[in-house]
Image (cartoon, rainbow, N blue to C red):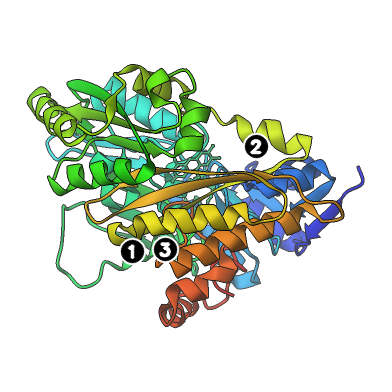
Amino acid sequence: MAYDVIYKGNKLDEKILKKLLSVVPGGISIKESDRIVYARDYWPITLRWMLDGKIPALPDCIIWPENAQQIVEIVKIACEEKIPIIPYGGGSGVVGSAIPIEGGIVVDMKKMDKVLEIDDSSLMARVQTGINGMNLERHLNRKGYTLGHIPQSLYCSCLGGWLACKAAGQFSTKYGKIEDIVIAMEAVLADGTLIKSKAVPRSSTGPQVEKLLLGSEGTLGIITEATLKIWPYPEKRAMLSFAFDDIARALEAVRKIMRKNVYPAVVRIYDENETLRHFYDVKEAKNKCMLILLMEGCKELVDLEEKVASKVCKNGIPCGEEPVIHWLKTRFNVKESSEFIPKGFIFDTVEVSIAWKNALSLYKAVISAMRKVEGMVIASGHASHFYPQGVCFYFTFGGIPPKGKEAYEFYENAWDAIMEACLKSNGSISHHHGIGIIRAKWLKEEMKERIKMLKKIKRAIDPRNIMNPGKMIK
Ligand SMILES: Cc1cc2nc3c(=O)[nH]c(=O)nc-3n(C[C@H](O)[C@H](O)[C@H](O)COP(=O)(O)OP(=O)(O)OC[C@H]3O[C@@H](n4cnc5c(N)ncnc54)[C@H](O)[C@@H]3O)c2cc1C
């Protein structure tokens, strides 16, 4: 097959391969077909490249370890030989974090997929990080619990990827994001040291250094195990929806709910365009903004939350349970990239976060910036994770590159427009997808002086720069 490789990797020699094989006999592949599979994650532009016969990057091999000790040995070999290591979960990352841009060893964690222990009295589960999200949630549900972490990628992502990217689930307003859910971690650092923190609710024993791995996108170490908070499976669910005249009114209603210390599990506000796209058959919502709320937990609490939320939303038109049921049924559908990209449409989603006082102005600034990009057809947004202090907006753009322009040029122009508008509005450039390749050039402006600290930490933990090199910081 003839193809271009956009990023070319190193080559493993026979000697290194033999060493690796002695650690994981039978658990290594150097086959071209496997290397092509691991050449990309779910970063949408890479699908366009692949369809054009371009491979983003080829790893030299893929390894499937079965335990942390094997990972210790693999990392030691890689460190000695200065070979890149790229941890790999579900490959559902959407910013290119798992793409092996300098080649090397992809460590696929999927064989480390066990729930090791459930501690009912402490409401904790100890789990290996290669477990698939849906398998973990189903396992917990069968035992009468929920993790409360339900990202849209539940079926195609793993616990390690959630921790490494600081993921946020659809029920996050109640249960928290992954950093609120994780209690303790075990990880292999870049020199092969195995670290493990204690499964206690809190400790005041200096900075919790292992937490540096949260959001590190594989650049500091490989997370092998985590102890997570779990909850008894909710007794009751209540579902409400309201149509508001505009996004400002819908945001204001949610801000007031949050101020009352009421935390519905699911809170989603769709702007006019997205309301039309998702709730076209709800008459009351025509040309309006839909707010959906789902409360769950013990009956008394849910009843109270329902009462408070209904009172606060009195300016909206009640649309009943049906829109929430529709959202529940369709929430894992992702047709856009698989259906539109092959037809020449360039599409992506971008999530950012912002404090309440700047929320509306950020929303307006980003939408207007997206619309100004030449070739843009769709520019819309919704808000899907809420705090008493602010909100996460999730923008969607789609368009066709103008004549004579490369797909990537249009794509990068759209991202640049969004990132610039976000930074000007005092937002953070990512709420839960991370940095990867596409956001790397914006990290300095986001972090300002803190980037020097990040560089020092990276150099101290990974002096040979073997962990996912070329990502996060150079
Ligand atoms: C359809 C779809 C919907 C999505 N919805 C959501 C959503 O609702 N919420 C959300 O937060 N994200 C969402 N995402 C993004 C993505 O699912 C998350 O970023 C997820 O956390 C990535 O997990 P993964 O296992 O697929 O990681 P991968 O893509 O395999 O890897 C991502 C990064 O984590 C590193 N990594 C993976 N495992 C480990 C490990 N064990 N130790 C150290 N580093 C590791 C990799 O090196 C890489 O840098 C969505 C993606 C898709 C495609």
- The amino acid type, in three-letter code, at marker 2 is Ser
Element under label 1? helix
Q: Which circle marks residue 210 in the picture?
A: 1
Q: At 52% from the left edge and 35% from the top edge, which residue is drawn?
A: 156
Q: Note whether 456 is above or below 370 in the view shown.
A: below
Taking the image as shown, residue 308 lies to the left or right of residue 459, namely: left
Give the crowd class for mark 2: few <14, some 14-19, many >=20 residues within 10 Å.
many
User: Residue 237 location in percent, x, y?
Assistant: 22, 22
**Which residue does the numbered mark 3 point to in the structure image?**
428
Q: Note whether 137 is above or below 431 in the view shown.
A: above
* Residue 326 visible, this angle: yes
Q: Note whether 229 is above or below 307 in the view shown.
A: below
Rounded to the nearest angstrom, the CA distance separating label 1 from label 3 is: 23 Å
Rounded to the nearest angstrom, the CA distance separating label 2 from label 3 is: 25 Å
User: Residue 286 location in percent, x, y?
Assistant: 44, 26
Give the mark nearest the N terminus, 1 or 2. Answer: 1
Which is more toward the observer, 430 or 1? 430
Q: Nearer the viewer, mark 1 or mark 2?
A: 2
Q: Is mark 2 within 8 Å of ligand 1?
A: yes
Element under label 2? helix
Give the crowd class for mark 1: few <14, some 14-19, many >=20 residues within 10 Å.
some
Element under label 3? loop
Q: Are marks 1 and 3 in contact (CB under 8 Å)?
A: no
User: Residue 323 location in percent, x, y?
Assistant: 38, 21
Which is more toward the observer, 377 or 15? 377
Q: At 49% from the left edge and 22% from the top edge, which residue is drawn?
A: 280
- The amino acid type, in three-letter code, at marker 3 is Ser
User: Residue 133 location in percent, x, y?
Assistant: 43, 35
Taking the image as shown, residue 11 lies to the left or right of residue 163, namely: right
